[in-house]
Image (tube, helix red, strand yellow):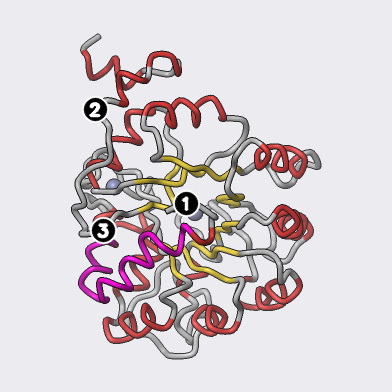
Amino acid sequence: MNRRAFLGSLAAPALLPSLARQNTAPALEWGTAVLDLHCHLRPQPASVIAHLDGAGVTKANLLTRGDVRARVEALQAAAPGRFTWFASDDITDPGAAERLRQAVGQGARGFGELKFHVEADGPELTRMYALAGELSVPILVHFQEVDHFPGEGTWATGYARTFDKVLEAHPKTIFIGHADAFWANISADYKNQAAYPTGSIIRGGVTDRWLAEHPNLFGDISANSGNNALSRDPDFTAAFLERHQDKLIFGSDCGCADGHGGGVSQGNNPAASRMAGKCVARETLGLLKRTTTPAIFKKIVWDNVHKVLKLEP
Ligand SMILES: [Zn+2]
Ligand SMILES: [Zn+2]
């Protein structure tokens, strides 16, 4: 086994400190520190750190599912101070609430991502909204009304029809919206016609309105969904970023190997082929940098997430 393969295969926390010495925070490539809200835990810890370093990302919030605390702790030991985490569980299982409550007791900073074939205002998610409010942690939900491939199914459905009532019913819960339907609905003409609609934005979409009207709604700009939405109409985007400068949070949801677009960045999602060969983190950080002021850039990539996750800067 060569040294690289050995590092990649490390799982035992006791072996990881040697990795830490090589993985201090990178130089500030983007002019300011960056936290990636939407970083899925990967099977190999070295791969997560390689993505951060490659993309110039300082810290990340790991999205986990099930009991993976040992893997989270291994990463935290390997790169001290660089990782926080969110917990998720099968919310259709009656024991999920108790396990999520436990995860928060063990240090999870929020719930997410919650990606399930249920209705956005159905009983399974509603229980989680209430629990997140009770525990004072944010909840990150994947909303999607259009399949990426035949048979995929839809996720947290009915967002554009019902979610304002959810926001009103849970004023103490901090919601972080994410994915296709959340972002497609920045345009008022969206009727679930495509996963990632293109063309100029018709002003007055529900996501734009609800970000302004509901103090408990935030937006995660990760993935092709966030990048695509903010790439459609540069005039709209500049004003949108300014309008919601305190409500938007940078995330990547990038699966690429190296923070430079190697490997596969958006799963095998044929609808997101515009991201093939690209690192979503780099693409979106570049887009933000080109489109907004340094002060707003810093809020979106660093300050806002620290407030919402209650992190020390
Ligand atoms: Zn997602
Ligand atoms: Zn990447």
What amino acid type should be assigned to the residue bearing mark 2?
A: Gln
* Helix, strand or loop under label 1: loop
Q: Quadrant of residue 105?
A: top right
The magenta-colored residue range is 285-306
Q: Mostly what secondary structure, the magenta segment?
A: helix
Residue bearing mark 3: 32
CB within 8 Å, label 2 to label 1 = no
- Quick check: 109 left or right of 49? right
Residue 191, above or below 170 = below
- Quick check: 231 left or right of 83? left
Crowd band around label 3 with a 10 angstrom C-alpha radius: few (<14), some (14–19), many (20+):
some
Q: Looking at the rendering, in which quadrant would you find the N terminus?
A: top left
Q: CA distance from mark 2 to mark 3?
A: 21 Å
What amino acid type should be assigned to the residue bearing mark 3?
A: Thr
The one of 262 and 189 positioned closer to us in this rendering: 262
Q: Is residue 301 magenta?
A: yes
Q: Is mark 2 within 8 Å of ligand 2?
A: no
The one of 195 and 1 positioned closer to us in this rendering: 1
Q: Residue at x 45, y 57 (%)?
A: 148
Q: Earlier in the sequence, mark 2 or mark 3?
A: 2
Q: Earlier in the sequence, mark 1 or mark 3?
A: 3
Q: Residue at x 42, y 30 (%)?
A: 75
Residue bearing mark 1: 312
Q: Looking at the rendering, in which quadrant would you find the C terminus?
A: bottom left
**Residue 22: image tag:** 2
